[in-house]
Image (tube, rainbow, N blue to C red):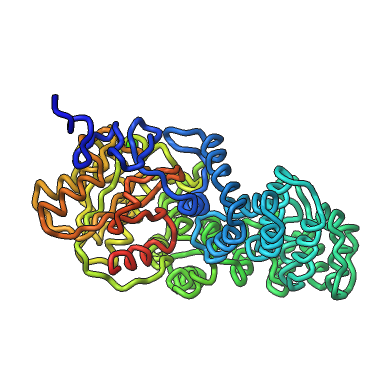
Amino acid sequence: MKFTKHWNVKKTAQNMAIPGSGQVANSAGGFAWEITPWQRLDRFLVLGTEGGSYYISEQKLTEANAITLVSLIKSDGEKVVARIVEISDSGRAPKNDPAIFALALAAAYGDVPTRQAAFAAVPKVCRTGTHLFQFVAEAEGVRGWGRGMRKAIQRWYNQTPIDDLTYQAIKYQQRGGWSHRDLLRLAHPKPLTVEHKALYKWIVDGEVTAENARLQAFEQLKTTRNVKQAVRLITDHRMPREVVPTELLTEAKIWEALMESMPMTAMVRNLANMTRVGLLQMKSAATKKVVEQLSNPDRLKRSRIHPIALLLAHATYSVGRGMRGQNTWAPIPSIVDALEEAFYKAFEFVEPTENRYLLGLDVSGSMSMCTVAGTPLSACAASTAMAMVTMQTEPYCMPMAFADQFRAIPLTKRMRLSDAMLHTQAVNFGGTDCALPMEYARKHKLEIDTFVVYTDNETWSGRIHPAQALMEYRQATGIPAKLVVMGMCSNGFSIANPADPGMLDVVGFDASVPQALREFVLS
Ligand code: CA
């Protein structure tokens, strides 16, 4: 009998824990490390749990995340709130919903200072009326109405500048079972200005007074069918699309007026509509404006638009056909290109490190089943896009796909995003061995400084753990190679050994990924 067959720290099959390493079972029958609660918080805030994963249902994944969150809130609640604000406010997450839920948990389970911090953070995290409705709905599921809650809502209404507040109040009067009227009645904010007072009166009683010209315009717009008049009202009073009568939305002139003050996210979402009504033409001023805005990094940053929103808009707009219904349009090539460029620009620009990278994409079956942040994008499509982001900056990148064996993929820097994603989606099957990128590089003598592995960390089929394969690679080549794990699913596992400073866990599709990568590589 050979004892190291059963206790070997250098070569351990992935269906067993590395002896003494503290690894735990993942959901796929393999072993990995558990990430820290703080890392889990970040994964949850960025990736959410919508749609669940290949192995775990949405309900179970949410439950598991909520349990971690609540215990973190109980041990260090104020720090949790600060993290929620940081990620929500910086626009690093594709969706704000996880941040709102986490904030509601902090307002329910935190100690007194935490609850105060959570309520004080409401305006920072709930930046629109819809966010506020969501917060109230989530909070109602975990706590009662109390003084803190009422005061937070009072502050939200009283401290939002009247212009923005009116805009919010007319855009969506109600969403998800809550209305501004409900909230004003429950919270009773005492208006601090006459304008606020007039607005509250309109929200509660529907009474329009002379103090608020925008409300008057809104009431007129609701009933008019005259294009000229509607255009004037939209232009003079910055009206959102949501308040324009549906019959008027087939008019290019109306969209032209709306575009004047349309937020970036709305513009991106309405590109197909604006093309269909004939406003966006190959050579029109409106198209020029769209392309200019999409090419402006400052504008992209200020709008907090997440790269994933641009990626999705690109995917939808470029096919010229809606997902549901018979809507078709002829996509304008310059806009398709601008959307792709904007996707890259929406990430923080970083200087190249000139490291030699191996970008290892997990294309196993599970990566096509888990979606990212409630979008139709699979974890696999999302990781391909993330790999392309690194390829735009770094001159030395070797892309590679793997499942339970190596699969070559011909990604290059100049390849179109949509083509790149097709290449990886076409090969989505098989078991998972996250050690393959390191093993392949060792066997084929590839000189690599940094391995980046895009995965859901549900690895199970290899003869050796990824962390061990990295050690072998370091020993064989003499290169002190590092490993970055891009977690593409909000579970609690990682193939990165937390005790090895040369391994890092990053949340895939965090808009700050390029920066985190650069800092780690240079550290
Ligand atoms: Ca898998």
The residue located at (77%, 66%) in the rendering is 155
- For residue 422, above or below residue 127: above
Ligand 1: quadrant of the figure: top left
Residue 390 at what x, y percent from top left? 30, 61
- Residue 337 visible in the current orientation: no
Dividing the image into 4 quarters, which one contains the N terminus? top left
Residue 392 at what x, y percent from top left? 29, 64
The residue located at (23%, 36%) in the rendering is 12
- For residue 332, above or below residue 62: below
Dividing the image into 4 quarters, which one contains the C terminus? bottom left
Residue 92 in the figure: left or right of residue 202:
left
- For residue 338, above or below residue 330: below
- For residue 357, above or below residue 375: below
| Res 274 quadrant in image | bottom right
Residue 332 in the figure: left or right of residue 426:
right
| Res 325 quadrant in image | top right
- Residue 349 visible in the current orientation: yes
Residue 55 at what x, y percent from top left? 43, 33
How many numbered marks are there? Answer: 0
Residue 297 at what x, y percent from top left? 44, 73
- List the single residue furthest toward the top: 1
Q: Nearer the viewer, residue 358 or 269?
A: 358
Q: Nearer the viewer, residue 252 or 148?
A: 148
The residue located at (31%, 36%) in the rendering is 17
